Amino acid sequence: MATDLVPEVAQPAADSPRPAAPPKGRRRTRTVARDLLRYRWLYLLLLPGLVYFALFKYLPMYGLTIAFKDYVPFLGYSGSEWVGLKHFQELFTGPDFGRLMFNTLLLALLTIVFVFPAPIVVALLLNELRINVLKRSVQSLVYIPHFLSWTIVASLTYLLFSVDFGVIANWIHGVVGGQKTDYVAQADWFRPLIVLQLLWKQTGWGTIIYLAALAGVDSQLYEAARVDGAGRWRQFWHITLPAIRPTIVVMAILTSGNLMDSGFEQIWLMTTSLNRDVADVFDTFVYYIGITQGSFSYATAVGLFKGVVGVVLIFGSNFLAKRLDQRGLF
Amino acid sequence: MKQRVRYYDSVGSRVFDALNVVVLTALALVTVLPLLYVLAGSFATESEISSRPFFLWPHKFVTDTYHYIFSTGTFVRALLTTVAVTAVGTVVQLLLTLTMAYPLAKRFLPGRTLVLNLVIFTLVFSGGMIPTYLVVRDLGLLDSYWALILPLAINPFYLIVVKSFFQELPEALEEAARIDGCNELNVFLRIVLPLSKPIIATFSLFYAVGIWNDYMSPLLYIDDSKKWTLQMIVRQLTAANADSANVLQQLETVTFPEQGLKFAVVVVATLPILFFYPFLQKHFAKGVLIGSVKE
């Protein structure tokens, strides 16, 4: 800060004696006070946001301590008794853990295999589309579902797949014959429907970031390649694909950080009494036992376990990306 | 985007182009046909919905379902609630996001890095559903409309994008205003905000869509069915395991167009978004990109 009007209270050279000036603590206080006064308007603007983060982001993190307590509402956070790792023990040895882990991981795996590559493929196809009008119209249309709520998506699924009048259900019945199937309620169809919903809702929107990366490619590269006799496939392989590789890595890191998040709203909306066994994931389980049954401490422990695994995953995949000679996210 | 020089058109290349057009057109159709079917279904008679497999134009146009839902207290109340909460919520979210993003864009501000790191940390780790619920409860916000607004008041991603946008604004303009005697508050109000119209438009729409579509907050925080939002009604009426008998009792009538109702409710809950979509579209790609390309 060259414009400081106050004379610099310089760091004394390492070997010089302590200056007679006021002790460090007070000097720092005075600097802070001076900064606060000097930038008072900026700090004032910052204040409401800080209150928000303190209240709704950091206070809940303090609330995580009840995962290690037997939380009793009228005793409060500090009055409730510490019980150590009891709730985690209960979770890991209980009958639900294996099922929750399996369901969560299987959905994550299906997402990685089917949902993650979809926007990349569509973006690449859009990028090769030479009719600009068509390109723009397709883009406008495929973005739409991203803006619809999960309740709408669940309703559409019901209207299309339900046993009584679902269009697709009837159509499949017409082709395959046999007994009518209630796709929406059946456990076997839960995961395929979840994947279909994700594909329908997110594929188009997901292309935005890849299209941006593609638009950033220097067109001289293509010209040079063409002069060198590269056909369309070679241009794609040696220029287009490498151009979006960093974006793919970043998106992969972000996705892996969310592996444990199965999307509460979507899963919850698609859960029926018939598919509970395959539908229950950590997120919905936390809701069941926490909100509907009032086991706040146990539910918090389950949520904390999920959150910690998420953090490990995101740092792990970032580390991996760096090892594989990519830039990584941070 | 610049028109590229034409490729050397081999047969393979032309076959690919043709296939590409077919695939992408099919994709666009798969995306919109379900929506158009629901729109058509909402204007069709009960018998047409159950007898015709798929249609985009009903044989006979009827508006029974709309008459019915708009004469139902529960539904109208939910619609008005949703509109009001969305309007107030969006204003609150924008105010908080803009005011916090501006100081964070000032590299010289002491403590800025600390606050930024605290914000970024919340993207990686959070207290989760139950502790957040308890905070909302302890603040006395259960069954209050504020519970649908305040816990979501700042989206950290949007905050960081807006911050980056502010950082890109020409510093010289702000400097000039400061020399002319503006304090930071005035610089923000008179110089920065007017320059930020595109980003304000983008994020007000993102925020509005977020609140309008939010299903989890009402599910968690609102017990009183009189305070339900539209998404709760949609869920109660149409979802697979909906306890429809119960809801329809609350909808206070004996006869009703049962299937058409589901179509119409979906349409009403979707229409405002589709109505604003063309305006939104102009901005959002830019808005998203400011945030993402920088990484």
Image (spheres, helix red, strand yellow):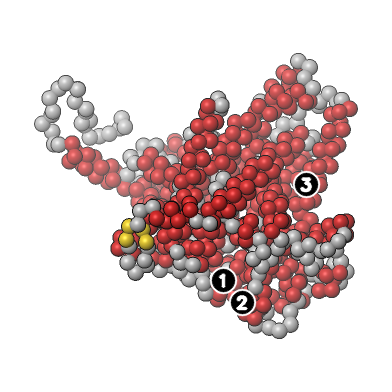
The residue at the point 87 percent across, 25 percent down is B10
**Spatial separation of the CA atoms under disc 2 and disc 1:** 8 Å
In the picture of the structure, the residue carrying the numbered disc 2 is: B74
Residue type highlighted by circle 3:
Leu
Disc 1 is placed on an element classified as: loop
* Label 3 crowd (10 A; few <14 / some 14-19 / many >=20): some
Q: Position of residue A48 (x, y in %)?
A: 39, 54
Tag 2 and tag 1 share a subunit: yes
Residue B267 sits in quarter: bottom right
Give the mark nearer the N terminus: 2 vs 1. 2
Looking at the image, residue A195 sits to the left or right of residue B119; the answer is right
Disc 3 is placed on an element classified as: helix
**Spatial separation of the CA atoms under disc 2 and disc 3:** 37 Å
In the picture of the structure, the residue carrying the numbered disc 1 is: B228
The residue at the point 52 percent across, 74 percent down is B224
In the picture of the structure, the residue carrying the numbered disc 3 is: B27
Tag 3 and tag 1 share a subunit: yes
Is residue A248 positioned above or below A91 on the image? above
Number of callouts in the render?
3
Chain letter of disc 2 in the image: B
Chain letter of disc 3 in the image: B
Residue type highlighted by circle 1:
Trp
Could you tell me if residue A102 is visible in this image? yes
